[in-house]
Image: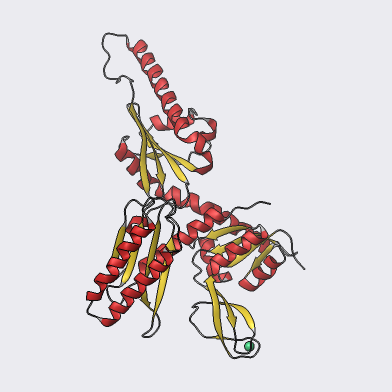
Amino acid sequence: MATDNSANRARYDFKKAMEELRNYRGRGTELISVYVPPGKQISDAMAYLRDEQGQAQNIKSKTTLKNVTGAIDSIMARLKTFNKVPEKGIVIFCGEVPRAGDQTKMVQYVIEPPEPITAFLYRCDSSFFTEPLDGMLVDKKFYGLLVMDRKEATIGMLAGTRIQVLKHFESMVPSKHHQGGQSSVRFERLIEIAAHEFYKKIADNCTTCFLDKLMDLEGIIIGGHSPTKDFFYNEQYLHHELQKKVIKPLIDTGYTDESGLKELVDNAQASINDLQLSQEREMMQRLFREIRKTEGGLDAYGEADVRRCADMGAVDTFLISSQLRKFRCTCQCPNGHTFKVTVDDPDQTVKCPECGSNAKVTESKDLIDDFFEMADEYGSNMQLITPDSEEGGMLLKAFGGIAALLRYRPE
Ligand code: ZN
């Protein structure tokens, strides 16, 4: 079974890096952010940093001076490893951040942004400058949007939190109050024909906008005036593949222009959240059903049990809480024993399970990343579960955030 978790993982890693970067605060003005756009020469960026290195000599505080020049050195060393700037640019964050007690530690993040960055930027501040990366999308998933009445229609898309207008057009449907000299029956008939043509036009435009992106289309949200939008939906004007993607209920909006799209997204937020949660919920309910089976269901929970099953290649899907904030560390003790352990903080003291002496952490990685790697190794699926649903909350509380659905029950 070929399973590609790479998009999920990229999204997780990027979100987590952003979360961490936003939380760091320097003791002084000493956290450095460098954005190098595609097309910029590495040598130009290096020259700029050397210049900043020179300027830094004016800093009065000795500690800040040391930290700033240290961070710039570290960034230059990292930049040097690139022959050229990657396709979408490169962003490096570096600086000393406080850790337990009076200590600080240097952190460095090298990020290839999911979308191209546009300008070179150097910042030295008491926090990292992440704004240009905010709202960038790691994957291409989006919602189709349509607001309509008999007079106009606007088609758009929602990706992340960004709303983009794709098409806006007005109809030729005459107003009902404008009868001219015609008989009212004949006039009614003309209106219906014009409306029918307009709905077909809306549907055709939706096809143009969305049909070749079905893979990334999470759903279509329809809004506008009643009963027009309901008629449009019930009569199935949309291409049948798109019709299947319509998210119920349809949404009433006061506007059917660009501002209607915004109104639509605001009013549909609950449905969008539900949809995103429904897959997670479904997986968790499958887990609970397996657990309830008396004759050994296809479930595993708790880190030790899940690892044991994973090592035997028995895991079909890892169900991991996105709230897990732990580390998987490789450790070595003075007597030469090496072992792996999961800890809350990689800086904490770890005792060797064999001889009890204090061991040194030689490598540490994010626990969720560790599960992503296991999923790749065994061709398992990886489902991150947010704590936003009741089931997701239970995963975290009852199972320590780690469970799995199995392919078979290992002995
Ligand atoms: Zn030992």
Seen in the picture, residue 248 relative to 40 is either above or below; the reply is above
Residue 179: % across, % down: 27, 14
Residue 36: % across, % down: 36, 57
Please state the quadrant of the image where ligand 1 appears: bottom right
Residue 28: % across, % down: 28, 76
Looking at the image, the residue that sits furthest to the right is 411
Colour treatment of the image: secondary structure
- The answer, for residue 223, to whether it is visible in the render is yes
Which residue is rendered at x = 50% and y = 29% of the image? Answer: 236
Residue 25: % across, % down: 33, 72
Camera-nearest residue between 88 and 327: 88
Which residue is rendered at x = 52% and y = 62% of the image? Answer: 392
- The answer, for residue 130, to whether it is visible in the render is no
The quadrant holding residue 383 is bottom right
Camera-nearest residue between 251 and 83: 83
Left or right side of 197 for 378: right
Image quadrant holding the C terminus, namely: bottom right
| Number of numbered discs on residues | 0
The quadrant holding residue 158 is top left
Left or right side of 271 for 381: right
Camera-nearest residue between 155 and 6: 6
Which residue is rendered at x = 49% and y = 63% of the image? Answer: 387
Left or right side of 364 for 375: right
The quadrant holding residue 54 is bottom left
Seen in the picture, residue 100 relative to 139 is either above or below; the reply is below
Left or right side of 169 for 293: right
